[in-house]
Image (cartoon, grey):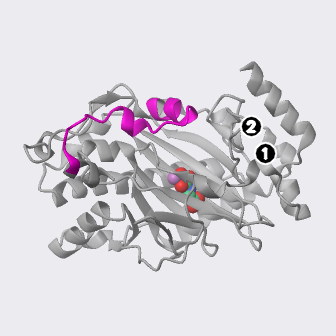
Amino acid sequence: MASNLLLVSEEKSLLKSVQEMSLDGDEPPSAYLVQENSFGSKDSSALIPIPIIDVSLLSSEDELEKLRDALTSAGFFQAIGHGISSSYLDKIRKVAKQFFALPVEEKQKYAKAVNEHEGYGNDTIVSEKQVLDWSYRLILHVFRKEKRRLSLWPENPSEFREVLVEYSTKVKSMMDHLLRTIARSLNLEEGSFLDQFGEQPSLTARFNFYPRCSRPDLVLGVKPHTDGSGITVLLQDKEVEGLQVLIDDKWVNVPTIPDALVVNLGAQMQIMSNGIFKSPMHRAVTNTEKLRMSLAMFYIPEAEKEIGPVEGLINETRPRLYMNVKDYGDINHKYHQEGKIALETIKIAHNNKDLDSWLK
Ligand code: OGA
Ligand code: NI
């Protein structure tokens, strides 16, 4: 705690904010520079297409098979036919951009506390070796409703709160539908995954703002990570690309499709699917030209509820790969701070080389 406070005040006095550096076109300080060997190749020329799934067609076997293939390979897909209108997606992008365009003092009213997750701000600094993300975030818990901390919810623009709740409600019903459909794609009972989210799952919104950066070759908007959620739905900027996913050890661009929502599985679905589905590694790059925004919605099982591999996905050739866990988000956070991979810590060891390569 004390050292954190020290680092933060040191940072304030020594460095300009990301927003100031962005406006002035400054050379980013070393704390933002990605070390070449820590993230693998920076090349992102791989031309692997990201699957596009029409959610309105998932009652057909063909589309269902496409969905299953997308989740067992890339772990990412672009959802179209999801029923949220183009003008509505523009509306949520607009209120997000309006909030970010407010003067710094206004945004600071919603600032997150140093050791907290929710609210407006940058990376929490936990170690001197940490590489910082070139971004600002606004993180808000939307569901369960009782968990909303309205003091951190912007009042400007005036429709911000209403739009966020309405969008979240739409995304939640799409996620429920997808989770039932994903179970069906594996010939499981429809509730096999969704029921594990509990009666009161959490839905957390994370608005990401990536200012222009003079050195996109050296600085990332968000470092490589896997989401600790069950499932994530991301609304990308309408024009500016930046999201990349790691497929076969190559960084692949996820193109912007104006009306599509990007869907990826988080670690908790990797656990529940007994490793059949992968929670993909992804990152966001920066650019010199334009500010980029995105909105990630994380759907997370109730913290009190134990989750684990679905019984129907455990058999002799595919033994149970993960222990049952509660509040994986908390475990994930703890190990992440120590630089460890949380999923590894709950993996059950089997003396079987096939399993190792299958899990890679
Ligand atoms: C995230 C994330 C990617 C993006 O918020 O977890 O991966 O494109 N964002 O902003
Ligand atoms: Ni992510």
- Camera-nearest residue between 166 and 308: 308
Q: Residue drawn 25% across and 71% down?
A: 66
Asked if ligand 1 lies within 8 A of label 1, the reply is no
Q: Is residue 151 left or right of residue 173?
A: right
Q: Is residue 100 left or right of residue 62?
A: right
In x, y percent, where is residue 43?
Answer: 58, 71
> Is 347 included in the stretch rendered in magenta?
yes
> Is 128 included in the stretch rendered in magenta?
no
Mark 2 is on which residue type? Ala
Picture quarter with the N terminus: top right
Pointer 2 residue: 111
- Camera-nearest residue between 186 and 41: 41
Q: Residue drawn 66% across and 41% down?
A: 153
The image quadrant of residue 93 is bottom right
Mark 1 is on which residue type? Lys
Q: CA distance from mark 1 to mark 2?
A: 7 Å
Residue extent of the magenta highlight: 331-353
Pointer 1 residue: 107
**Cβ atoms at labels 1 and 2 below 8 Å apart:** yes
